[in-house]
Image (cartoon, rainbow, N blue to C red):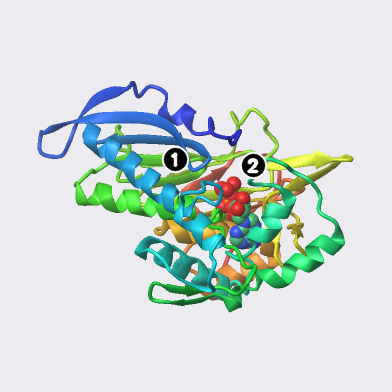
């Protein structure tokens, strides 16, 4: 369980289990709120729609989790990672998610790497047997993490011996895209989906104003205070931080975002990266990738590629946010907060 799941509850307080709000042409729609555990985190859903809509969100998430869990022995990904032949056929869902992740791997030069699972496993991040692997162990595992060796052609996936995949960096964002697409099809006009820090908003909030999303203060253990507040509508807001999953040994903190060049937790001088994009999977993938890349390379990436906004928080508490956020992001810290221009 992530400890940061309470972070947006402040914004949800006041919405009781079912509220009635007036939609556009005088038709009243129920406002539903539900929380449940899935994808190893707390999922919060608030939407102007029906109970079936909420039920459907839960179904979409559960179905995805049943495909991409690395630990559930009956999941498709578990079967892929424990294959007996190099080439296997995968579902459309897995093919699409892998394709989307590989596109980001390509543009980030492997900062996002779906083949890092042998490394994450060695650190025990999925099994809860957290430990520091030896240099030799990491050196032996690194050759198995070459994402350029992944061959995906339609639904046919070929992985060389020993390679294992993990969608931990993109699955929640992908899930938010699937849910948002479903809700838009149902003409749901207002929704806040929060999948453990992967937020997706639709329309305005119940007061008819833009959703206000708190960006977590990385130093606040209680997760009650924000580093800033962002106005958002019809976009994903995803934060990757080194305070989300970690363990300490001999006074050193080891976190779960890996640098594929070393097999060690990424040490880029950042404590969190928040990416805002219309695509949940892109926001999720890029927040992880830019965390690995660090501030300078991250800014360079944004200048070259664009199409998203980003908030970086550095180890010394400084914030850097892209110019598209001016007027909609308010940093709350007294420390330096600088705008990144084109
Ligand atoms: P969270 O799961 O806390 O939301 P992220 O979206 O940043 O965080 O994803 C981190 C997860 O992604 C890790 O738990 C691991 O499963 C996987 N992972 C770690 N490092 C990388 C990386 N460099 N590229 C791709 N996936 C990674
Ligand atoms: Mg991510």
Q: In which quadrant of this rendering is ligand 1 seen?
A: bottom right
Relative height, residue 170 to residue 18 (above, below) = below
The residue at the point 24 percent across, 32 percent down is 51
Q: Is residue 82 left or right of residue 20?
A: right
Tags 2 and 1 touching, CB below 8 Å: no
The residue at the point 38 percent across, 61 percent down is 93
The residue at the point 37 percent across, 48 percent down is 63
The percent coordinates of residue 257 (x first, y second) are 67, 54
Q: Is residue 131 left or right of residue 215?
A: right
Dot 1 corresponds to which residue?
194
Q: Residue furthest front?
A: 84
Q: Is residue 137 left or right of residue 9?
A: right
Numbered badge on residue 256? none
**Residue 264 appears in view:** yes
**Quadrant that contains the N terminus:** top right
Dot 2 corresponds to which residue?
244
């Amino acid at each position: 369980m992530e400890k940061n799941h309470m972070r947006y509850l402040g914004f949800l307080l006041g919405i009781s289990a079912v509220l009635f709000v007036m939609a556009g042409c005088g038709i009243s729609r129920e406002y539903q709120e539900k929380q449940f555990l899935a994808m190893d985190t707390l999922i919060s859903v608030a939407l102007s729609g029906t109970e079936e809509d909420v039920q459907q969100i839960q179904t979409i998430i559960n179905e995805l989790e049943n495909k991409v869990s690395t630990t559930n022995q009956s999941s498709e990904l578990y079967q892929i990672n424990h294959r007996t032949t190099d080439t296997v056929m995968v579902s459309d869902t897995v093919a699409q998610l892998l394709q989307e992740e590989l596109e980001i791997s390509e543009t980030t030069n492997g900062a996002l790497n779906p083949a890092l699972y042998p490394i994450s496993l060695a650190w025990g991040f999925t099994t809860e047997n957290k430990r520091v692997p030896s240099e030799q162990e990491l050196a032996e595992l690194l050759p198995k993490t070459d994402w350029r060796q992944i061959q995906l052609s339609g639904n046919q996936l070929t992985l060389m011996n020993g390679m294992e995949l993990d969608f931990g960096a993109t699955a929640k964002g992908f899930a938010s895209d699937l849910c948002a697409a479903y809700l838009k099809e149902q003409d749901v006009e207002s929704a806040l989906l929060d999948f453990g820090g992967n937020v997706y908003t639709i329309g305005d909030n119940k007061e008819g104003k833009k959703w206000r999303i708190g960006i977590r203060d990385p130093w606040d253990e209680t997760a009650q205070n924000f580093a800033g507040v962002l106005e958002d509508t019809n976009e994903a807001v995803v934060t990757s931080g080194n305070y989300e999953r970690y363990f300490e040994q001999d006074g050193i903190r080891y976190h779960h975002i890996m640098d594929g060049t070393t097999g060690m937790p990424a040490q880029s001088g950042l404590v969190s990266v928040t990416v805002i994009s219309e695509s949940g999977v892109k926001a999720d993938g890029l927040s992880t990738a830019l965390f690995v890349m660090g501030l300078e390379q991250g800014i360079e990436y944004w200048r070259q590629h664009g199409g998203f906004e980003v908030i970086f928080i550095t180890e010394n508490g400084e914030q850097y946010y892209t110019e598209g956020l001016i007027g909609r992001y308010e940093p709350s810290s007294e420390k330096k907060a600088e705008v990144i221009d084109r």
